[in-house]
Amino acid sequence: MNVVLLMVLALSVGPVLIAAGIRFLPMRGTVRPVGRAAVLTLVAGLVPAIGAVLSLFGSWIPLIPLNPDLGWRAATPLVLGVIAVLLLMVPPPRARARGAATLSRRRIAQFAPKQWIWTVVVLACLVLGTTIAAGAASTPDEFGHYTMYWTSMGTSSFGTHIYGWHFSTPSLITLAVLLAGVFAALFLITAAPWNDDIETDAAVRRLRATNILRVATGVVLIHLSVILQSLGGTAALRGGSVTSELGTVAMGTSFAALAPALTWSGIAAFVIGLTACFITALTAIPARRVAATTRS
């Protein structure tokens, strides 16, 4: 149990330290939300992070007797991501512009970094491809749910659970809702009227758009980590068959060689995703600025 708790602490506290280092060093000169927006940003980053930790490790923590099934563990980060996006979508208090309005055409790319948009899109495609592959390999269990993976050798066969259609369908629906929410939020940020201070308003919009894409990236990575670690466990399954000619023959899955890569990729995705969520939360906390000095 002590080893398990140490692993939980390492995978949970590590991303916090990494996020703090990124937020208060490279990002310390960025604008931050204030008032209600700061509170919502803090909550939006912490909700999916804490929820993901409890969903994945709750059954290992004595004081939190959670034991969710694979479908619940996979969908939880995405559901919490939708909540986070809705919180970040709430506009900050707005000072109405006086005088002439700025009529220049605005585009989402002015406020949302393209690299973050492409990151979300690529990760969503990766999740979709992995889900389809796992679903295609799944077979029905005794209840008709596509949750099983079987492998055979001769007349012997053995099976285990896999991230099949029964587990993945709710997550696919939630992923679609999340992506729709993300791009709706980006559109609303772009379309909102300017404040009096256009330069500051533009910086705040860029931060809000980046935070939305960052938290979406984080929850999709955490969701992907559940899939990869589940497939890693399925790939590592071993069985045996007793034959009259060869005695006991060991059997494994057709993708057994990928088990270590799947497991470690899942751990890496979890750490990176959790770090992204914590960075989002920490953008609500002011960082000390370093005054620039000039030499004559």
Image (cartoon, helix red, strand yellow):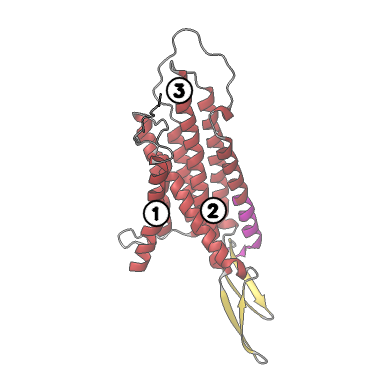
| CA distance separating discs 2 and 3 | 34 Å
Residue tagged by mark 2? Answer: 224
173, 42: nearer the viewer: 42
| Alpha carbon distance from label 1 to label 3 | 33 Å
Q: Earlier in the sequence, mark 1 or mark 3?
A: 1
Query: What's under tag 2, amino acid-wise?
Result: Leu
- The residue sitting at 53% across, 67% down in the picture is 233
Q: Quadrant of the N terminus?
A: bottom left
Residue placed under numbered mark 1 in the picture: 14
> In terms of depth relative to the viewer, which is nearer, 144 or 287?
287
Mark closer to the chain start, 2 or 3: 3
Query: Could you tell me which residue is drawn at 47 percent across and 42 percent down?
Result: 215
Q: Is residue 285 visible?
A: yes
- List x then y, in percent, for residue 40: 38, 35
Q: Nearer the viewer, residue 238 or 166?
A: 238
Residue 249: percent from left, percent from top: 62, 84
In the picture of the structure, the residue carrying the numbered disc 3 is 201
Q: Quadrant of the C terminus?
A: top left
Mark 1 element type: helix
Q: Residues within 10 Å of mark 1 (few under 14, many from 20)?
A: some
Mark 3 crowd level (few <14, some 14–19, many ≥20, 10 Å Cα): some
The residue carrying pointer 2 sits among few (fewer than 14), some (14 to 19) or many (20 or more) residues within 10 Å by Cα, namely: many
Q: Which residues are magenta?
A: 127-143
Instruction: Using the image, tell me which numbered label, if any, was put on residue 130.
Output: none
Q: Amino acid at mark 1?
A: Gly
